[in-house]
Image (spheres, rainbow, N blue to C red):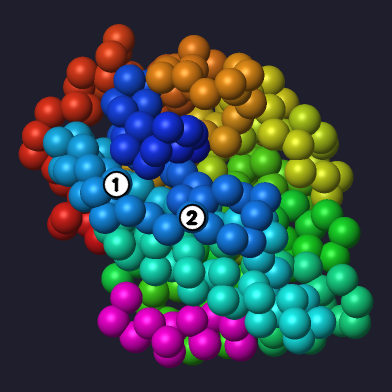
Amino acid sequence: MPWFGAHLSIAGGLPRAVDRAVSTGCEALQIFTKSVGQWRARPLPGHEVAEFRRRLADTRLRAVVAHVSYLVNLAAPAPSLRARSLAALIEEYDRAERLTLDAIVLHPGAHTTGTPDAGLRRIGDGLVRLLRRRPRGRTRVLLEHTAGQGTTLGHTFEQLRTLLDLVDGAPRVGICLDTCHLLAAGYDLSTGPGYAATMAALDRLVGIDRVRLFHLNDSRRPLGSRVDRHDHIGEGYVGLDGFRRVVTDPRFAELPMILETPKLPGPRESDPLDRRNLALLRRLAGGRGPAQAGGEAVSASPNTRASKR
């Protein structure tokens, strides 16, 4: 069965995100390691890194990833913005390495002017530069499939294939699929035939084995809308049957699947909306329910991540 979790706040310090994951009953966790609306990142104090890693070692969280700032745009035609984006991406990669995270999740970028092909080449060049500058890195870079709003790239399997080819199939580069983005981009998950066709195209063009992570979000907008608006599980156009297909697909049986669904205002130790969505996903997946009050079933040693990185 997949490892279910959520994107959680780091308010109060990075270790607090681990506490929130345990309280929520997560098996996987996604965080920001810095403020997503600023280029500048506060330095990570050594004691905070050590405490984060210590708390992580005391849990059964099986995958922990960071989402890269939305400011980063490797596809930007302006050399100054592209250089700033690469520097920020390298910094986020280094932070993830210090925290022993499994992956960073990156929106490929938007070409803004010019052609999509030129934008894809710029993204590929940026990724190659990152990999060359950090040749011994263990953290993966996961390219997130996008909804295709405006000039954003990565909304077709063909574009993702091009990006993988541009990095010569580097094993440290993988794919993150977002269920809302897939539907908005025109890939139908809501019907049996649509799901089968989508997965067949994914396997043919990208490769099922390149998928390392799912973002589980319903879509407030219909199939092919090219609009990225997340909704709670089963309350949008993906629908309960669509999510049942994803979470019971044996090809994804041991992947982390992380919620990015709406939350109640303000950081809290355990958001009831997250708990509700996680409980529903587990019922759809077949009934395993580690997310009981306090997250007890995922808070005991030993840690299982070391063998999964």
Name the residue: 43% across, 58% down.
Answer: 43
Residue 297's image quarter?
Answer: top left
Percent x, y of residue 197:
64, 54
Magenta stretch: dominant SS?
A: helix
Q: Which mark is residue 48?
A: 1
The mark that comes first in sequence, 1 or 2, is 2
Q: Amino acid at mark 1?
A: Glu
Quadrant of the drawing holding the C terminus: bottom left
Q: Amino acid at mark 2?
A: Arg
58 lies above or below 41: above
Structural crowding at the residue carrying mark 1, measured as other residues with C-alpha within 10 Å and reported as few (<14), some (14–19) or many (≥20): some
Answer whether residue 142 is visible to the viewer in this image: yes
Which region is colored magenta?
Answer: 124-137
Residue in the foreground of this view, choosing between 18 and 143: 18
Quadrant of the drawing holding the N terminus: top left
Say which element carries label 1: helix
309 lies above or below 298: below
**Which residue is farthest left?**
302
62 lies above or below 286: below
Q: Which mark is residue 42?
A: 2
Answer whether residue 165 is visible to the viewer in this image: no
283 lies above or below 15: above
* 127 magenta-colored: yes
Residue in the foreground of this view, choosing between 298 and 186: 298
Percent x, y of residue 113:
91, 77
Structural crowding at the residue carrying mark 2, measured as other residues with C-alpha within 10 Å and reported as few (<14), some (14–19) or many (≥20): few
Name the residue: 21% across, 18% down.
Answer: 296
Name the residue: 69% across, 34% down.
Answer: 230
Percent x, y of residue 103:
40, 60
> What whole-number distance in Å separates the C-alpha atoms at marks 1 and 2?
12 Å
59 vs 95, left or right, is: left
